[in-house]
Amino acid sequence: MFQLDYMDHSPLYEQIKEKIKALIISGAMKPDEKVPSVRELAQSLTINPNTIHKAYKELELEGYIYSVRAKGSFVTPIYNKINQARKDNLLLELDKLVAELAYMNVPKEQLIARIEELYGRGRQKNND
Amino acid sequence: MFQLDYMDHSPLYEQIKEKIKALIISGAMKPDEKVPSVRELAQSLTINPNTIHKAYKELELEGYIYSVRAKGSFVTPIYNKINQARKDNLLLELDKLVAELAYMNVPKEQLIARIEELYGRGRQKNND
DNA sequence: TTAACTGTACTAAGCCACATAGAACAGTTT
DNA sequence: AAACTGTTCTATGTGGCTTAGTACAGTTAA
């Protein structure tokens, strides 16, 4: 499914969260699709199941997946409805990032072009 | 100068780095301006001088400030020349951020408007 | 020269997040 | 019944973070 980056010094459970989130955000995983079981992913990454569980628990808290006892964990549909606080945080992070890129004299046209491209691919209007 | 956020669970030296960086990036601190001494900032934040030193050491490694023994630490001029690797990292982070905002159905016009505004204020062309 | 200030470099100690190992419970599926 | 799911414990070890204290080296102002 994916691999861990051993050059990355962030906690394993954080890396797992990011990888799963990336799969969801990119559309590689669809709503209600099953993510690997705790034990299965632990085995494939050669790490402890408790670490996977911690990652999944936080992903659930943040609204990306939901877990059902004895069945598995699945991608949350209608994610966009849930998370105004997270949206605000992301916009603040965006501000910091853009401010630093501006400080480095990266032309704003380059940033805007990136946005256009990312919105161009894989996006369909979502009206719920 | 600034205060630490005790709701923030990131390491103190990381928080200090971010605060100083923000002051530099926003233009609140000018090139060659002196940042507080290790001991002075430690006293005003009521934390250990070693922790400040660790923050400053990393800020120097990343090119934001330079330190002179027995004189002090100062904001680096011509920062934009130094750091191509960091620039690449920031652009990758930008991609992730934008991808997630797109997934949340935040209109791209909103992001572009933010960029225009941030580039509008405080920016003058830098040709060296 | 002296006193007070700068950055820098150690050692020692304690706390806590992270990760592992191992076991168990509860419910589903075949 | 067996094999799978998520979930919840305890116990253990490692390493990063922070503090405290001391010291060295160089600058600056009295």
Image (spheres, coloured by chain):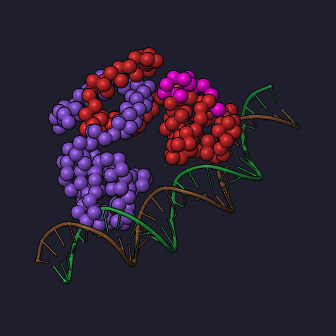
Chain colours: A red, B purple, C green, D brown
- In the rendered image, the quadrant that contains the C terminus of chain B is top left
Locate residue B43 relative to residue A6 in the image: left or right: left
- In the rendered image, the quadrant that contains the N terminus of chain B is bottom left
Query: What x and y, as percent, mark residue A56?
Result: 58, 39
Locate residue B79 relative to residue A6 in the image: left or right: left
Residue B15 seen from this side: no
Query: As displayed, is residue C10 above or below residue B99?
Result: below
Q: Nearer the viewer, residue A107 or A121?
A: A107
Q: Nearer the viewer, residue A74 or B11?
A: B11
Residue A112 seen from this side: yes
Query: What x and y, as percent, mark residue B8?
Result: 40, 52
Query: As displayed, is residue A21 above or below residue B74?
Result: above
- Residue A86: say if magenta: no
* Start-end of magenta stretch: A23-36
Count of numbered marks: 0
Residue at 67% in and 41% down: A46
Q: Nearer the viewer, residue A99 or A34?
A: A99
Residue at 20% in and 48% down: B31
Residue at 38% in and 37% down: B85
Query: What x and y, as percent, mark residue B72?
Result: 24, 61
Locate residue A29 relative to residue A43 in the image: left or right: left
- Identify the image quadrant of residue C2: bottom left
Residue at 25% in and 48% down: B76
- Residue A35: say if magenta: yes
Query: What x and y, as percent, mark residue A9?
Result: 51, 46
Examine the residues drawn in magenta and state their main secondary structure: loop
Q: Nearer the viewer, residue D29 or B38?
A: D29
Locate residue C21 relative to residue A91 in the image: left or right: right
